[in-house]
């Protein structure tokens, strides 16, 4: 122990150390409910020792076996910022994965609501009522009441189908706004982390102080960022945290490399891109998310709310072409990734299937090889055309062909007149502009004329039939009611010739909608199950993490009593030494 007056400094060090420990404990108690606050712990160290004498040296180590030393007091060696880096990374990864599946589940849940209820009437009921009207027409084909009922239900079918389709498009736009807001929030978080990096490095540069509060706020931002995207991070010497997002540098020692959007000119859909890696003048963009890899936990490709939103929304407004001519794998790798696009394609497909099924019954076609003069080519050509089947076709109350279609396209009639070289008149079908993609001389794809399609964008109930329901082709050309046609109509809903996805088994129209809703419900249950399981996992990890970083009021109060007792002991030590010195000076000195 120091001699004389120096002994007072030993007591003083204990007094100061205990006071600082009390202050740290009080700070913990004050922030017991502060979000993101990390518990601080005081670690005491011995101050230097005064060596009074050395004992005999060891013959093996040439060091003193024991030294006569006196301590100079105690000091605070460090204030520990209690964190478990492993738990932090585990927590952020699992919370990001849970957010991904929660975003997917929310999408399927919204879709299910749209499918079950559309403007107060289920779409399935509209389908059923159209079928019921057709069954009534089959009983009495010439009845004006039954004919008018079919046209009414067909009109309702078109209106409700388009309302459902528009609802899905509106939800896509809602998701698009969420994507933009989430991307902007990620950029905002990245900028704040970069700013905190700069301040923390400046504060800690002298190695005299640890920026505890700033680190807490930065860690809280990393927690939020972990729910929004797949991030990895590491702290480098100096206190800076470098962050990678989807494997690309996002925050470094210098700045935050923010994301941007590429906006589709037609749909207005915003897709996150890397601003600094993209070439805007050449319209060459680097997307943040790569969906060419399978979505799986093993590959860590199922993390982040933003990715879940982008995947669920999809890249386009889908229609029947997103199912047409694809293999099952091609479908699953493209449209199948997005629940919204999948349902859009399936709704458009079922409507198209119903329309074509009924149109082909009311106004059937047959292939004929016809030689006629083609005005475009300026010569006679011989081609195989689909023409109105005069032999098997039915007619309306005028008893003249061709028979009217029930559903029409807005800008194209069903038939055009063709006169062959023998002077015969044919009614050739104005076919849809489908088929393989063609290219111009520069190698650019030639766009298809989508106004020729029988899809939700174009179909209407035939205006001719709305004006006069008697022109609905339910009669044979001899004027008799066509029970032959009606017999085929009765079974139209039960023919198994439609597919939910390219590789699925054929199903009927009456089963199509149920299977579509069921598939979405199944996906929703899977997403919900995974999300809830991960939520429990995140909660468990969070509880473990709180045991490390959280503040326990009971424990801190115990520390407060301990440090208060240490403060009192140091105070009594100083008082005792003071009394001894006073006695020496006043009593012994005289």
Image: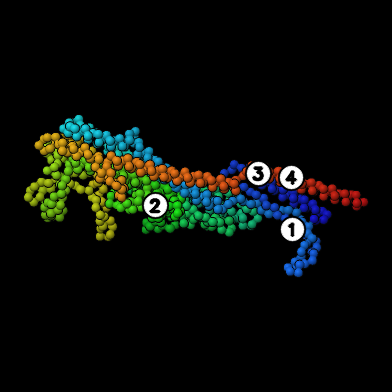
Which residue is label 2 attached to? Answer: 262
Q: Answer yes or no: do the residues labelled 2 and 3 have beta carbons within 8 Å?
A: no
Answer with mark 3 or mark 1, whichever residue precedes in sequence: 1
Q: Which mark is residue 48?
A: 1
Q: CA distance from mark 4 to mark 1?
A: 24 Å
- Give neighbour class at mark 1: few <14, some 14-19, many 20+ (Cα, 10 Å): few
Q: Pointer 4: what residue?
A: 565
N-terminal of the pair, mark 2 or mark 1, is 1
**Residue 526 image-quadrant placement:** top left
Residue identified by numbered label 3: 555
Spot occupied by residue 482 in the image (x, y as percentages of width and height): 14, 36
Q: Is residue 465 left or right of residue 193?
A: left
- Residue 143, numbered label: none
In front: mark 2 or mark 4? Answer: 4
The residue sitting at 40% across, 58% down in the picture is 279
* 2 or 3: mark nearer the eye: 3
Which residue is at 57% across, 44% downward?
Answer: 35
Look at the image and tell me whether residue 249 can be seen: yes
Q: What is the C-alpha distance between the residues marked 3 and 4? A: 15 Å
Q: Nearer the viewer, mark 3 or mark 1?
A: 3
Disc 3, SS: helix
Please state the horizontal and vertical placement of residue 285, each as a whole percent of the image. Answer: 39, 56
Residue located 76% across and 48% down the image: 570
Question: Could you tell me if residue 180 is visible in this image?
Answer: no
């Amino acid at each position: 122990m120091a001699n004389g007056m120096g002994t007072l400094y030993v007591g003083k060090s204990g007094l100061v150390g205990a006071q600082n420990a009390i202050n740290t404990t009080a700070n913990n108690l004050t922030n017991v409910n502060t979000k993101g606050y990390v518990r601080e712990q005081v670690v005491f160290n011995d101050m230097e020792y005064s060596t009074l004498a050395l004992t005999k040296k060891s013959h093996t180590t040439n060091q003193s076996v024991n030294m006569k030393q006196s301590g100079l007091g105690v000091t605070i060696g460090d204030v520990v910022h209690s964190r478990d880096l492993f738990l932090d990374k585990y927590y952020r990864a699992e919370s990001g994965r849970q957010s991904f599946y929660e975003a997917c589940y929310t999408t399927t849940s919204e879709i299910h609501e749209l499918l079950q209820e559309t403007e107060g009437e289920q779409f399935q009921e509209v389908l059923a009522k159209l079928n019921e009207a057709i069954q009534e027409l089959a009983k009495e084909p010439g009845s004006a009441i039954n004919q008018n009922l079919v046209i009414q239900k067909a009109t309702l079918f078109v209106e409700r189908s388009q309302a459902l389709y528009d609802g899905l498009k509106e939800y896509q736009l809602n998701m698009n706004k969420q994507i933009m807001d989430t991307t902007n929030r990620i950029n905002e978080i990245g900028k704040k982390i970069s700013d905190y990096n700069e301040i923390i490095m400046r504060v800690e540069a002298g190695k005299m102080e640890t920026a505890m509060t700033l680190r807490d706020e930065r860690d809280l931002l990393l927690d939020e960022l972990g729910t929004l995207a797949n991030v990895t991070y590491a702290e480098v010497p100096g206190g800076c945290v470098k962050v990678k997002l989807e494997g690309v540098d996002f925050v470094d020692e210098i700045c935050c490399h923010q994301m941007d959007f590429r906006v589709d000119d037609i749909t207005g859909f915003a897709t996150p891109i890397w601003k600094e890696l993209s070439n805007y003048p050449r319209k060459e963009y680097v997307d943040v998310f790569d969906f060419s890899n399978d979505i799986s936990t093993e590959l860590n490709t199922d993390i982040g709310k933003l990715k879940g939103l982008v995947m669920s929304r999809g890249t386009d407004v889908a229609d029947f072409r997103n199912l047409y001519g694809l293999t099952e794998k091609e479908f699953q790798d493209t449209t199948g990734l997005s629940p919204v696009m999948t349902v859009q394609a399936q709704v458009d497909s079922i409507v198209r299937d119903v329309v074509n099924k009924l149109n082909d019954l009311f106004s059937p076609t047959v292939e004929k090889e016809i030689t006629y003069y083609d005005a475009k080519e300026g010569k006679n050509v011989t081609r195989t055309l689909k023409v109105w089947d005069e032999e098997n076709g039915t007619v309306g109350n005028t008893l003249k062909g061709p028979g009217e279609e029930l559903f029409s396209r807005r800008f194209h009639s069903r038939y055009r007149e063709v006169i062959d070289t023998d002077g015969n008149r044919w009614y050739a079908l104005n076919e849809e502009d489908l088929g393989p993609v063609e290219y111009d001389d520069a190698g650019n794809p030639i766009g298809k004329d989508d106004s020729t399609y029988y899809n939700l964008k174009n179909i209407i109930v035939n205006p001719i039939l709305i004006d006069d329901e008697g022109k609905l082709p339910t009669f044979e050309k001899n004027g008799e009611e066509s029970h032959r046609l009606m017999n085929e109509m009765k079974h139209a809903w039960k023919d198994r010739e439609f597919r939910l996805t390219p590789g699925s088994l054929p199903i009927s129209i009456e089963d199509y909608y149920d299977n579509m809703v069921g598939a979405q419900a199944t996906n929703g249950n899977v997403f919900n199950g995974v999300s809830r399981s991960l939520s429990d996992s995140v909660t468990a990890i969070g509880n473990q993490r709180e045991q490390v970083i959280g503040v326990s009021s009971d424990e801190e109060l115990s520390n407060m009593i301990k440090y208060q007792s240490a403060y009192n002991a140091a105070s009594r030590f100083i008082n005792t030494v003071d009394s001894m010195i006073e006695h020496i000076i006043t009593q012994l000195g005289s």
